[in-house]
């Protein structure tokens, strides 16, 4: 059904406080089924390509805890193939929450208007959040979803997800 996220496909830059998740560093539902996804080779910067699904669910979490009281931003770098379909019916959504029991912050992403073969970072302005000073669990849990329309969709490429500290 789905391959587990590979921790070897997640990079951290200590100088900038930036996490980079390659496609294999994310948990992508149905990614092990070649009829639904084309996954890149391990260790490459190639994107994952959605062939067709009716349940888009891509999730990740930071392997290390985030710093309390600091602001962060989440973004996905995506593109669309010329054969894209099914994105007119419903928008996709991105979610970020600090801690498993944290409050989710959502951003709506309209994928219907994206140009083909043009890499773009979504959401515009990034999904920003703050780690509460009193947080017990400071792991970031995040996702990219379209699970509500029930319609088939395809042609989405996931290049990477990035979580980075916002300088004060």
Image (cartoon, helix red, strand yellow):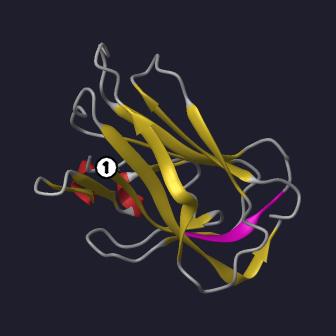
The answer to whether residue 32 shows anywhere in this view is no
16 shown above or below 103: below
Residue 151, quarter of the rendered image: bottom right
The part of the chain drawn in magenta is 152-157
Kindly tell me whether residue 133 is visible in this rendering. Answer: yes
Is 167 on the left or on the right of 78, as rendered? Answer: left
The image shows residue 55, relative to residue 24, as above or below, that is above
Question: Is 36 left or right of 58, judged from the image as shown?
Answer: right
Q: Looking at the magenta stretch, what is its main secondary structure?
A: strand
Farthest residue toward the front?
Answer: 168
Closer to the camera in the image, 124 or 5? 124
Q: Estimate the x, y position of residue 3 in percent, counting from the top left.
A: 44, 49
Picture residue at 25% right of the left edge, 39% below the top: 63
Residue situated furthest left in the rendering: 15
Tell me if residue 49 comes above or below residue 89 in the rendering. below
**For residue 110, what is the image quadrant?**
bottom right
Quick one: label 1, few (<14), some, or many (20+) residues within 10 Å?
A: some
- Look at 38% across and 59% down and name the residue there: 24
Front residue of this view, candidates 46 and 100? 100
Can you give x and y, in whole percent of width and height, for residue 108 in the image?
69, 49
Q: Is residue 152 above or below residue 139?
A: below
Q: Quick check: is 36 in the magenta stretch?
A: no
- Residue 81 on image: x %, y %: 66, 82
Q: Which residue is label 1 attached to?
A: 166
* Nearer-the-camera pick, 151 or 100: 100
How many tags in the picture? 1
Give the x, y percent position of residue 125: 52, 58
Indicate the quadrant where residue 111 lies.
Answer: bottom right
Q: Residue at x 58, y 65 (%)?
A: 37
Helix, strand or loop at mark 1: loop
């Amino acid at each position: 059904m789905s391959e587990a996220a590979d921790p070897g496909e997640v990079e951290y830059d200590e100088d900038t406080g930036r996490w980079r998740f390659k496609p294999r560093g994310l948990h992508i539902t149905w990614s092990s089924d070649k009829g639904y996804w084309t996954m890149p080779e391990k260790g490459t910067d190639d994107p994952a390509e959605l062939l067709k699904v009716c349940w888009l669910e891509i999730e990740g979490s930071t392997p290390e805890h985030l710093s309390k009281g600091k602001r962060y931003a989440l973004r996905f770098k995506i593109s669309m193939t010329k054969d894209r379909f099914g994105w007119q019916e419903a928008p996709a959504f991105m979610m970020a929450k600090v801690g498993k029991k944290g409050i989710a912050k959502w951003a709506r992403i309209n994928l219907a208007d994206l140009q083909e073969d043009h890499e773009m970072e979504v959401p515009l302005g990034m999904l920003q959040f703050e780690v509460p000073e009193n947080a017990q669990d400071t792991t970031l849990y995040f996702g990219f979803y379209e699970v509500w329309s029930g319609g088939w969709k395809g042609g989405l490429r996931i290049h990477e997800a990035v979580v980075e500290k916002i300088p004060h």
